[in-house]
Image (cartoon, rainbow, N blue to C red):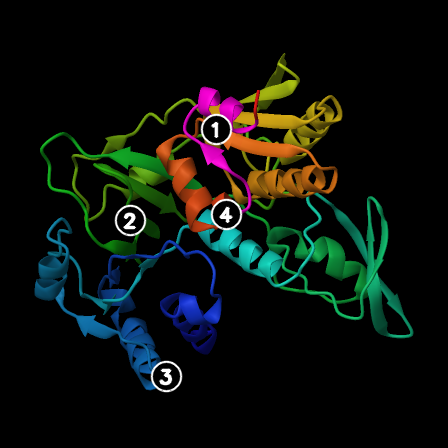
Amino acid sequence: MVRMALRGFHCIRNWATEVGYGDPGYIRLGYMLIVTENQIDGLRRNVELGRRLGVDTRFVGPDEIAAVEPLVNAERLAGGAYEPDGGYIDVTKMVLSWLGAATAAGAEVLAPLEVEEILVSSGAVTGVATARGVIAAPLVVVATGAWARDLLDPLGVHVPIERRRLDMAMLEQEPGARGLHTFITDGNSNLVIRPDMGRRVLAVAYPPEMPEVDDPLADAGPVDHETTRRASAGPWPSAYRPWPSPRRSMTMGINAERANGTVIAKADGRIDSSNSREFHSDLEAVIAESDAALVLDFEDVSYVSSAGMRVILLAAKNLQKSGMRFVLCSMNDSIREVFKISGFDKIIPIHKSQAEALSAVGA
């Protein structure tokens, strides 16, 4: 596992040569695991193992913990493991960069498309069965994460993957308070916390019992962040409070209208894995009504995940094959940045406003 992590970090550091497309969105913060006295021996063993295998990590005592991250109260801590190069990636940017690199290399993207079964004959893989039919392939890479068991169990391949929910919360510091600057795991309370945007921090608590779920995309029901609040009572600033998330819609919609022969489609809400199929279906219906050009307006869209961007890429390819023009417009800065970093702006023209987009397609 350590060697795999090192290989992954090498890929992130050398993205331009390893992938050659886009950006993984890596944010270097430094990572620290802090523990109490009953966990110190195991921590020291892990530090020594990591150092032998080439990890840039070291043991830090309470005084150095406070120096690395002044917001942590180190009085009751026995020590920690500190990795100065630790941080986190932007998953959407990374996935879309891989997708862009694969597309540029000639790969064909079929999305959204559900794989129902891996086909095997005489002990060898022959392809996959999908909702649109069979795709023959001598090699199948299963990178489906939480859904891997659904495909592998019928083949007698059992992987140690369990689908469990974690308690996650966005917290915010009081105005004027000093901000957190380090990615930290508290080994005593099983709380992981890292800086986010502005005064906000993201906290994830690992409760003693995490119920297994059948469908990770199903509605989790009422959310109770009591676990995170209790864990936050550890060596953390008491000034943190739950942060009310901005308007988040798990549904989305598309309203279409015509202007001089061009169809203008205005999407609304969040476009993510929970509604990418709905988005794909709605967009296909709009495309069916289009004659010469389609303008997709993002003015009322707050977020687009990699699942949503795959739908947009597929639409662009289909429209290109039919000789129709396809442009995007009115994106907020964060969405525009993701499209730029992933290289999608080189595939699909993006305009600042609807008026500019209509002018570009001659409407």
Specify the quadrant of the image occupied by residue 111. Answer: top right
Task: Kindly report the distance in space between the C-alpha atoms of the residues bearing marks 4 and 2.
Answer: 33 Å
Pointer 2 with pointer 1, Cβ within 8 A = no
* 295 falls in the magenta region: no
SS at mark 1 in the image = strand
Q: Which residues are magenta?
A: 347-361
Q: Earlier in the sequence, mark 4 or mark 1?
A: 1
- On-image quarter of the C terminus: top right
Which of the pair 246/215 is nearer the observer? 246
Using the rendered view, name the quadrant where residue 158 is placed: bottom right
CA gap, disc 3 to disc 4?
41 Å
Instruction: Indicate which disc residue 329 carries.
Output: 1
Q: Secondary structure at mark 3?
A: loop
Amino acid type of the residue tagged 3 in the rendering: Leu
Left or right of 32 in this view: 113: right
Report the residue marked by disc 3.
53
x%, y% of residue 182?
A: 22, 54
